Amino acid sequence: MTYNDHGGRPRQELAPRSGSSRPQGSRGRVPAQGTYHGPRGTRQRPSSSRRSSGPGYPLRSRSINFQSGRARRLSANRRLLILAALALVLLVLLIVGISSCVRGCSAEQPAAEVNPVDERVAVGVSEDLTKQFSTELDRGEKLADIAAHADEYENQGLLELALTQPAAIDFVAAYPEAEKSAQPYGESVSKGTVPQLYCWDSRWGNVDYAGGPLALTGSGPASLSMAYMALTGNGDRTPADFAQSITDADMASGDSLMSGTFLSDSLGDFGLSCSTYTSNADNLTQVLDTGTYLLIEVQAGMLTDETHWVIVVSENSDGSVQVYDPTSTEVSSRSWDPATIAGASDTLYALTAADSDSSSE
């Protein structure tokens, strides 16, 4: 019996297990190759040069490299970085190549020429024709806008006006937002020269007259205003002014929305006089020879689809007559046979200055 190092209980000496030949103090040593002494007896140990991981438990020895996974990851990352760098270099080269090509192509091909007046018109077209094209192109764009906002027009007649009279498109396009007031004529007037006026002029076309915009209803006031300016040389009375006078006289009536009675009875207030004649070709040309102007109430279906007023301004050298129609640019742009114009009405209203002699038949 032996005692422990600290003076406690005596420590018994353990006897070696039976069948074990391991000598005292041989713990941790590897037995001789070929045999194994264990609790179940002696067995033949396989021949191996690898060491056991512990007593009695043979393990196959294998090489473990704890840094191999990390090394592989680092190697893969390096390859990715190299590939990314190569891709970036290729991208830069591609961009540089495209830019060089674009610059080279631009240098080789000069910029296409454009019309300096309006790029919508081909190069080489004269300035005058270009401006005419520009006007029509602008009207086309405005007509499309009118169509898109057609529901904003209370009077559908304005939409028809835009379709039948291209020159009225600008007026119709602006009408929904325009002030319904009149503006001065603002242009010079020469006595003996009839200015060509249209009902849809923005200076008076927005004014209400006879239940609608003067642009649609004002052929009488517009024709009378043209005669007044030519006979007096004054531009102080526009179609809007005469429309108000006709309304005040309660003469905005009939199919043409101006009674002929207003011409016969009320023109003295404006320095004018009126004589009436039976409408025929001979009377028409003879009255024009005296230097007067004729107002005619043209019946529907003769010059246009509606009854309205026009003014006959002159006789041409070929015997035809010039008519200014405030509702139609087409009628105003051509000459007419006197018989055609005379046949469109029953009465000729000859207007002169108040101090001129006049007679009636």
Image (spheres, rainbow, N blue to C red):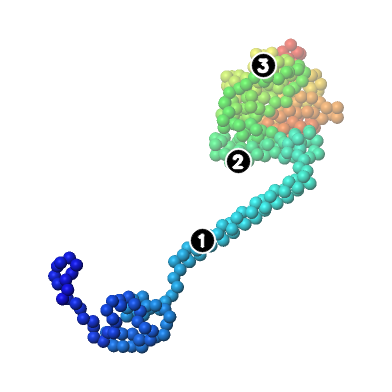
- For the residue pair 68 and 185, the one nearer the viewer reads as 68
First along the sequence among labels 3 and 2: 2
Locate residue 96, reporting x and y percent. 68, 50
**Dot 1: within a 10 Å radius of its alpha carbon, few (fewer than 14), some, or many (20 or more) residues?**
few
Residue lying at 81% horizontally and 23% vertically, measured from the top left:
286
Of marks 2 and 1, the one in the foreground? 1
| Residue type marked 3 | Asp
Residue picked out by circle 2: 147
Q: Quadrant of the N terminus?
A: bottom left
Indicate the quadrant where residue 148 lies: top right
Residue 19 is situated, as x and y percent measured from the top left of the image, at 26, 87
The kind of residue on which mark 2 rests is Ala
Task: Please tell me which of labels 1 and 3 falls first in the chain.
Answer: 1
Question: In 3D space, how far apart are the residues under numbered discs 1 and 3 (Cα atoms)?
Answer: 96 Å
Residue at screen point 86% across, 27% down: 317
Q: Are marks 2 and 1 in contact (CB under 8 Å)?
A: no
Mark 2 vs mark 1: which is more N-terminal?
A: 1
- Amino acid, disc 1: Leu
Which residue in the structure is indicated by mark 3?
A: 236
Residue closest to the eye, 72 or 125: 72
Q: Secondary structure at mark 2?
A: helix
Question: Element at badge 3?
Answer: loop
Residue 250 shows which numbered tag? Answer: none
Q: Which mark is residue 74?
A: 1
Farthest left residue? 9
Q: Nearer the viewer, mark 1 or mark 3?
A: 1
- Compared across the picture, whether 147 is left or right of 123 comes to left
Is 183 on the left-hand or right-hand side of 3? right
Rendered position, 21 above or below 231: below
